[in-house]
C-alpha cells in the first residue's frame, strides 16, 4: 500500500512540469495572438491607404480643388477642406467650376473604364439641369439665371466651351463633328403682316460654332447668321458636312458647312 501511495505522489510531481509547460504555451499563444490582432490590421490598412507610386501620389492639387486619393476608386473631390462629391464606383480625375454659378462639373472614370461628366449642384443655383448629349458632349442650363453652357471631354480633361458665352446650347453631334449655337443679339422688330397690321416681335440672332472631334479648336461661323422669333434653334445633321434647322414660320434651311469651315472637313 505504501508503495502505491509513493508511486502516485511521484507521478503527480512528474505531471506538474508538463501541465505548467502546456499552460505556458497557452499563455504565449494568447499573447502573440493579441499582439497580432492589434498590429496586423493597422499595418494592412496603412498599406492600402497610403501606398504610393507614379499613378497614386496621394493628394492631387488642382487649386483651388484637391482630389484624394489619386486614381483610387471611391476617391473624393475637395474644396476648402470640404468634400464636394464621392462615388464608390467612380475615380474622380478632374473638375472645373461652372462660370457665374456656385456649381461644379467633374470628370470621372467608371468601373468599366468609360469616362463621364457629372455635376455638383449648389442649391443656390436654383432650377439647373445637366445632361449628356453623347459620350463626349454635355449641356448645362439654368433657367433662373439665364445661363446655358456646353462641356466636352477631350484628351482626358473636362473642357468648358467658350466660357465667355452665357447662352451656349443646342448641341448636335455626328460621327466626326459637333455643332452648337449661342444668341448674339435680340431686339424687337416691327413688321407689317399680310393684313396690313403692324406686329412687333422679338427677333433672336444666332451664331453657330463647329467642332471637329479630332481638334480642340472651335470654329465660329462668323459669316453665317441665323435669325428667328424663337430663342431656341434645333440643329440637325443631314450628312457628315451639312446641317439643317427649321424656323418658327415652318421654313427649313440646309447649310453646307464646308463653305464656312473647309479645313474642318
Image: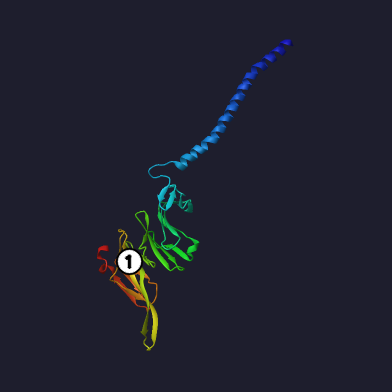
Tell me if residue 109 can be seen: no
Which residue is most to the bottom?
Answer: 196
Residue 225 locus on image (x, y percent)? 31, 73
**How many numbered marks, from 0 up?**
1
Residue located 36% across and 84% down the image: 191
Q: In what element is the residue under mark 1?
A: strand
Residue closest to the eye, 242 or 103? 103
Residue located 65% across and 19% down the image: 16
The N terminus is located in which quarter?
Answer: top right
Residue located 38% across and 86% down the image: 198
Q: Residues within 10 Å of mark 1 (few under 14, many from 20)?
A: some
Residue 101 locus on image (x, y percent)? 44, 62
What sort of colour scheme is used for the picture? rainbow
**Which quadrant of the view contains residue 129?**
bottom left
Which residue is most to the right?
Answer: 1
Q: Is residue 118 left or right of residue 254?
A: right
Residue closest to the eye, 194 or 177? 194
Tell me if residue 45 can be seen: yes
**Which quadrant of the view contains residue 116?**
bottom left
Q: Is residue 6 left or right of residue 150?
A: right
Residue 165 locus on image (x, y percent)? 37, 66
Query: Does 169 sit above or below residue 10?
Result: below
The C terminus is located in which quarter?
Answer: bottom left
Q: Is residue 100 left or right of residue 2?
A: left
Residue 215 locus on image (x, y percent)? 30, 59
Q: Which residue is mark 1?
A: 209
Query: Does 27 sit above or below residue 99?
Result: above
Residue closest to the eye, 224 or 58? 58
Amino acid at each position: 500500500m505504501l508503495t502505491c501511495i509513493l508511486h502516485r505522489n511521484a507521478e503527480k510531481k512528474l505531471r506538474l512540469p508538463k501541465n505548467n509547460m502546456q499552460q505556458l504555451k497557452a499563455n504565449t499563444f494568447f499573447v502573440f495572438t493579441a499582439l497580432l490582432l492589434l498590429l496586423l490590421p493597422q499595418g494592412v490598412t496603412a498599406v492600402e491607404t497610403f501606398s504610393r507610386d507614379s499613378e497614386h501620389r496621394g493628394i492631387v492639387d488642382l487649386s483651388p480643388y484637391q482630389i484624394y486619393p489619386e486614381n483610387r476608386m471611391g476617391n473624393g473631390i475637395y474644396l476648402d477642406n470640404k468634400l464636394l462629391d464621392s462615388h464608390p464606383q467612380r475615380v474622380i480625375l478632374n473638375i472645373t467650376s461652372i462660370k457665374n454659378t456656385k456649381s461644379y462639373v467633374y470628370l470621372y472614370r467608371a468601373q468599366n473604364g468609360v469616362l463621364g461628366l457629372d455635376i455638383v449642384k449648389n442649391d443656390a443655383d436654383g432650377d439647373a439641369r445637366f445632361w449628356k448629349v453623347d459620350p463626349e458632349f454635355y449641356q448645362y442650363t439654368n433657367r433662373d439665371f439665364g445661363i446655358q453652357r456646353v462641356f466636352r471631354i477631350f484628351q482626358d480633361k473636362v473642357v468648358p466651351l467658350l466660357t465667355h458665352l452665357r447662352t451656349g446650347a443646342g448641341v448636335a453631334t455626328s460621327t466626326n463633328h459637333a455643332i452648337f449655337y449661342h444668341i448674339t443679339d435680340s431686339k424687337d422688330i416691327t413688321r407689317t403682316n399680310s393684313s396690313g397690321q403692324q406686329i412687333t416681335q422679338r427677333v433672336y440672332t444666332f451664331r453657330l460654332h463647329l467642332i471637329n472631334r479630332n481638334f480642340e479648336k472651335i470654329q465660329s461661323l462668323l459669316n453665317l447668321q441665323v435669325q428667328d422669333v424663337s430663342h431656341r434653334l434645333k440643329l440637325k445633321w443631314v450628312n457628315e458636312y451639312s446641317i439643317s434647322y427649321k424656323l418658327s414660320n415652318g421654313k427649313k434651311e440646309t447649310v453646307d458647312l464646308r463653305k464656312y469651315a473647309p479645313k474642318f472637313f
